[in-house]
Amino acid sequence: KCLILGCGPSLSKINEDQIKKLSKDHLIVTIKQSYLRFGEYSDLQFFNCNNIIKYERKKAKFICCSPDTQSSRRWGSQEIDEFFHIKNPAKKLKDFENTEDFFQKEEVGKHLGPGIMVEVVIPLIYNLGIKEIITAGWDYHKNEQEIEHFYEELDRKKFGNPANIPYRGENEESIENSGKINSFLASKGVSLC
């Protein structure tokens, strides 16, 4: 079992007691700034080249996925335990005729999502053999506007390489990807909610 904590606004509805309880029998995955709230329970911490901050080691393994190289100065003194380099040119999930090809172990972290959840988090969790995946903070909306987070927008502007406003159609593509991922995982006996 696995609980994935993203950075969407719904994460603000989750409290520490809930995570502490789930951490007893779930792999806890944090993405980017969700580590700041729940790092003490995190087993795997994922980040990329947007909204960069330095994460202090607690117990989590630090996993980075980026088109930048691991030796890039962008990471500064950030510890990185595992690095996935996105190919150039990279394909997106929507470019794969067969979703299973995107999820092959040797393809993890080599393609664009959009979004780190699609690029590396869910493919890696799937390849670990997890059969039950719960997500919180993986929020999308159909409007073409900035993606909201559980933290204040002013905070985001203080991060290294703040993420841009989504490109036209990115939110819609992300929603379509989540449906495609859910269908694929269900066909493999994996529950995603």
Image: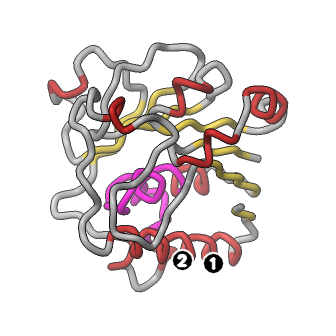
Q: Residues within 10 Å of mark 2 (few under 14, many from 20)?
A: some
Identify the residue under disc 1.
Answer: 183
Q: Which residue is mark 2?
A: 180
Q: Is residue 112 above or below residue 59?
A: below
**Region of the chain picked out in magenta, as a range:** 102-122
Q: Regarding mark 1 in the picture, which secondary structure is present there?
A: helix
Q: Position of residue 27 (x, y in %)?
A: 70, 37
| Kind of residue sitting beneath label 2 | Lys
Q: Report, in whole angstroms, how far the alpha carbon at label 1 lies from the one at label 2.
A: 5 Å
Q: Residue at x 27, y 39 (%)?
A: 49
| Residue 187: in magenta span | no
Residue furthest out toward the bottom: 97
Name above or below for residue 73 compared with residue 136.
above
Cβ–Cβ under 8 Å for marks 1 and 2 = yes
Q: Nearer the viewer, residue 190 or 104?
A: 190
Colouring used for the render? secondary structure
Residue 20, position as x, y percentages in the image: 78, 26
Kind of residue at badge 1: Ser
The verdict on residue 104 being magenta is: yes
Q: Residue at x 56, y 14 (%)?
A: 58
Q: Position of residue 57 (x, y in %)?
A: 49, 14
